[in-house]
Image (cartoon, helix red, strand yellow):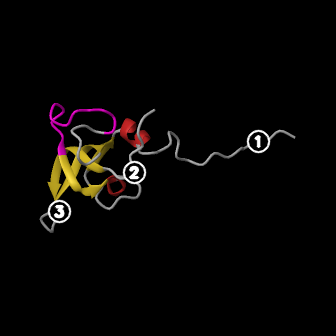
Amino acid sequence: MAKKVARAAVAASSRWTDPDGIRMPAGEVHAWERGTNQTVCGLPLSRAELQRFPHVDWQDVQPATGRHADEVGRVCPRCAAGMGARRDERPWTRRDPRP
């Protein structure tokens, strides 16, 4: 059984600098557990040439709600699933119920 990751930082393919001079993730972002050398989806950081952002939490790079998601191009779906995201975030409703 896979280990559940409670709090993950971010590893990204690129970076940008905000107006305060702090580097932020950009491009494709992955969830990364601090102290390991791979992402939640199993991608090795060094071989994939991903940059670590230990000061940025995974929740902060989600395009819908994150405050550091300005330059995020793609969120890894396997990392999102490993962090507890559902495949279809839209609530399900029945449009034409049977009598």
Q: Nearer the viewer, residue 75 or 84?
A: 84
Mark 2 residue element = loop
User: Residue 34: horizontal and vertical position, in percent?
Assistant: 25, 48
User: Residue 68: horizontal and vertical position, in percent?
Assistant: 28, 59
**95 left or right of 78?**
right
Q: Is residue 86 magenta?
A: no
Tell me the amino acid under the disc marked 3: Asp
- Overall secondary structure of the magenta section: loop
Which numbered marker is on residue 11? Answer: none
Which residue lies at the image location 22% right of the left edge and 33% below the top edge? 44
Residue that badge 3 annotates: 18
Measured along the vertical axis of the image, is residue 90 above or below residue 87? below
Q: Which span of residues is magenta-colored? A: 40-51
Measured along the vertical axis of the image, is residue 98 above or below residue 65? above
Tell me the amino acid under the disc marked 1: Asp
Residue that badge 2 annotates: 6
Q: Nearer the viewer, residue 26 or 33?
A: 33
Spatial CA span between label 3 and label 2: 27 Å
- Tag 3: Cα neighbours inside 10 Å, few (<14), some, or many (≥20)? few
Mark 3 residue element = loop
Q: Earlier in the sequence, mark 3 or mark 2?
A: 2
Spatial CA span between label 3 and label 1: 48 Å
Residue that badge 1 annotates: 96
Image quadrant where one finds the C terminus: top right
- Tag 1: Cα neighbours inside 10 Å, few (<14), some, or many (≥20)? few
Q: Which circle, 3 or 1, is nearer the viewer?
A: 3
Q: Nearer the viewer, residue 38 or 25?
A: 38
User: Residue 89: horizontal and vertical position, in percent?
Assistant: 52, 46
